[in-house]
Image (cartoon, rainbow, N blue to C red):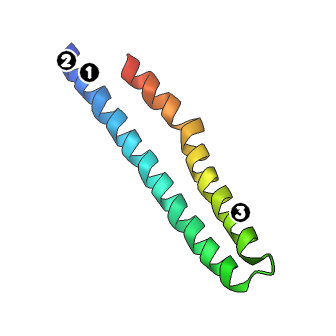
Amino acid sequence: MSDERFKESVEYVGKLIDLAGVAVIAGGIVVATVVFVVHLRGSSEGPEGAYRRYRQGIGRAIFSVSSSWLPQTSFARSR
């Protein structure tokens, strides 16, 4: 495998990892939104409590990707 082909392969894998990260964040937002609607309709916490849970759910989705996948992607691209 040539050096140029190897670099292209690493770049392609990095883009796939980025895409997977975006998919996880989007999925986390969808799940957090569904949970928000459910809690909004039947929660004793009221809208404020449901919204707080919604923000926490979105934060978890973003944090899970940023803390585990993004450092690996940037490392692979720096090589």
- Say which residue label 1 marks: 7
Q: In the figure, is residue 8 to the left or right of 42?
A: left
| Residue 42: image location, x then y, percent | 72, 85
Per the model, the C-alpha gap separating discs 1 and 2 is 5 Å
Sequence order check: which comes first, mark 3 or mark 1? 1
Q: Which quadrant does the C terminus fall into?
A: top left
Q: What secondary structure is marked by label 3? A: helix
| Residue 2: image location, x then y, percent | 18, 16
Image: 13 above or below 62: above
Q: What secondary structure is marked by label 2? A: helix
Residue 2 visible in the shown view? no
Q: In the figure, is residue 61 to the left or right of 7?
A: right
Q: Amino acid at mark 3?
A: Arg
- Residue positioned 63% across, 72% down in the render: 36
The residue nearer to you, when weighing 18 against 41, is 41
- Residue positioned 81% across, 81% down in the render: 44
Sequence order check: which comes first, mark 3 or mark 2? 2
- Say which residue label 3 marks: 52
| Residue 3: image location, x then y, percent | 22, 14
**Callout 1–callout 2 Cβ contact below 8 Å:** yes
Q: Amino acid at mark 2?
A: Glu
- Say which residue label 2 marks: 4
